[in-house]
């Protein structure tokens, strides 16, 4: 299963929903889209607007590959499960977000060869990215050091 | 100590949950936006929820009143936030009330600080970012001390 998620942001991400539905038409695999506040109704893919964190985790676990907005929360959750990740940044020019920081993050991770960044968005480019994504290594999870730093500061302040 | 974890929903919340170990041994509570994850948040610690105050200026201003009420009621020793804008009212009052503050810029900011970060910079005791190249873009107070991932 290919999981597509636009996250919990309150602006629609119609470009991704549309392209993901096109991908569902082209791919031999099931596609499920978490569509967010988009008004589009996918015709080829399964979809839901929002799912609970628990449901999202189980969807990610079942997915072979995940296509997502380049939001920090989504990326962290997907990589926790070690799944190949394709990022489609929300862009300001399409009114999908208030600035282009998702593009910055996606480019930084692409430069580290840890994700596949899709710039020219279409069903075809998503399919190519899906085929390409299995060669990408998941990000090593390391929240430990930062937690220790926080713990130290709290001790200082105590 | 008692620590207020202030964050909007989505990525800011996920980032906060990534580093909960850092608050072990302390009493924590959340201040965040209503979302599909309310139950998850409440299963971890007590929580105060409000609407997304970034949507309207009057909600943002209202959050200053609400924020003061929450801080006076809970009397935390520390306010921690990963943003977004919800951090501002809480850091503002924390500074006036002498509560210690730590801001952690979101992992999603790689080269340029967020608007929240630019404001928070002047209000907080500690200002941390999650990419070394971003620390150079902010003032001398900015520190890179690791990332949530």
Image (cartoon, coloured by chain):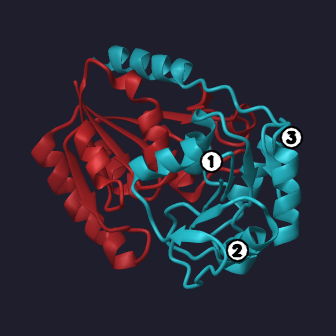
Chain colours: A cyan, B red
Distance of label 1 from label 3 (alpha carbons): 24 Å
Residue B75 appears in the rendering: yes
**What's the mark number on residue A111?**
3
Q: Residue at x 48, y 45 (%)?
A: A57
Q: Residue at x 75, y 77 (%)?
A: A93
* x and y percentages locating residue A79 in the rendered image: 63, 37
Give the answer, above or below, for where B18 lies relative to B52: above
* x and y percentages locating residue B97 in the rendered image: 23, 42
Name the residue nearer the viewer: B45 or B124. B45
Q: Tell me which corner region of the image, top left, top right, bottom left or bottom right, holds residue B129.
A: top right
The answer to which of marks 1 and 3 sits earlier in the sequence is 1
* x and y percentages locating residue B35 in the rendered image: 35, 61
- Identify the residue position indicated by label 1 in the image: A63
Instruction: Identify the secondary structure beneath mark 1.
Output: loop
- Identify the residue position indicated by label 2 in the image: A21
Q: Tell me which corner region of the image, top left, top right, bottom left or bottom right, holds residue B74.
A: top left
């Amino acid at each position: 299963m290919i999981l597509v998620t636009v996250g919990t942001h309150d602006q629609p991400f119609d470009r991704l929903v549309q392209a993901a539905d096109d991908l569902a038409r082209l791919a031999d695999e099931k596609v499920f889209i978490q569509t967010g506040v988009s008004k589009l109704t996918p015709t080829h893919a399964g979809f839901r607007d929002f799912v609970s964190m628990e449901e999202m985790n189980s969807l990610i676990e079942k997915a072979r590959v995940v296509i997502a907005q380049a939001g920090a929360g989504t990326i962290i959750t997907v990589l926790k499960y070690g799944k190949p990740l394709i990022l489609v940044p929300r862009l300001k020019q399409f009114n999908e977000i208030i600035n282009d920081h998702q593009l910055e993050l996606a480019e930084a991770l692409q430069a580290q060869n840890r994700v596949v960044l899709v710039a020219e968005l279409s069903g075809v480019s998503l399919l190519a990215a899906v085929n390409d994504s299995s060669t990408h290594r998941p990000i090593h999870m390391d929240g430990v050091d930062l937690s220790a730093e926080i713990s130290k500061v709290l001790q200082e302040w105590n | 100590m008692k620590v207020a974890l202030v964050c909007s929903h989505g990525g800011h919340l996920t980032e906060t949950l990534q580093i909960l170990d850092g608050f072990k041994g302390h009493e924590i509570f959340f201040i965040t936006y209503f979302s599909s994850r309310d139950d998850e948040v409440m299963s971890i610690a007590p929580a105060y929820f409000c609407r997304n105050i970034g949507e309207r200026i009057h909600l943002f201003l209202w959050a200053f009143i609400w924020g003061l009420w929450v801080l006076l009621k809970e009397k935390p020793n520390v306010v921690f936030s990963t943003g977004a804008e919800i951090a501002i009212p809480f850091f503002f009052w924390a500074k006036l009330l002498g509560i210690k503050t730590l801001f952690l810029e979101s992992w999603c900011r790689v080269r340029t600080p967020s608007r929240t970060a630019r404001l928070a910079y002047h209000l907080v005791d500690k200002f941390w970012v999650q990419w070394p190249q971003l620390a150079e873009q902010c003032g001398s107070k900015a520190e890179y001390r690791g990332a949530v991932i």
